[in-house]
Amino acid sequence: MIKSNCLNSYYFEILLYSNYLGVFMINLLASTTKLAQQLILGFEIFIFIIAFIMIAIGLLQNKQSQTGLSALNGGNEELFSNSKERGLDKTLSIWMLVLGIIFFIIALIISIITNTLL
């Protein structure tokens, strides 16, 4: 009789501790989900700003080439021309490249956070 009471109290303590652990895990998961949503919102705002900056830089860049359709109709006016970027054109191209890389990395981070934490 004493052994069964000890076992019952032991099982009750295990059940009680597992209940506390379950409540703790639910609270931790809820706080993690809320944090993940806030992180995603921050990254989305940042990527939105980067997208507008990239559009502005694209509009400021010099249009030295003809159109993209010249490859389809056989246009070769600039095939062997030595067109090296200098000055503002080179700076804007570098900025566009850097912002494009940042945009891509942040998009990957958002997708990873969305798939793992939410």
Image: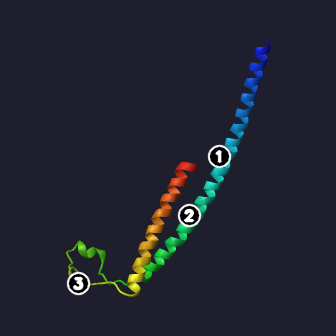
Which of the marked residues, 2 or 1, is nearer the chain's N terminus?
1
**Residue 118 image position (x, y, % from top left):** 58, 49
- Which three-letter amino acid code belongs to the residue tagged 3? Ser
Q: Which residue is mark 2?
A: 44
Q: Residue at x 30, y 78 (%)?
A: 67
Residue 29 numbered tag: 1
- Name which of mark 3 and mark 1 comes first in the sequence: 1
Q: Is residue 68 left or right of residue 76?
A: right
Q: Position of residue 70 (x, y in %)?
A: 25, 76
Q: Mark yes or no: residue 61 visible.
A: no
Question: Where is residue 9 shown, x and y percent of the image?
Answer: 77, 23
Q: Is 41 on the left-hand or right-hand side of 98?
A: right
At mark 3, the secondary structure is loop
Picture layout, residue 13 above or below residue 80: above
CA gap, disc 3 and disc 1: 60 Å
Q: Amino acid at mark 1?
A: Leu
Q: In this figure, which colouring scheme has been used for the structure?
A: rainbow
Quarter-of-image position of residue 11:
top right
Q: Is residue 32 above or below residue 55?
A: above
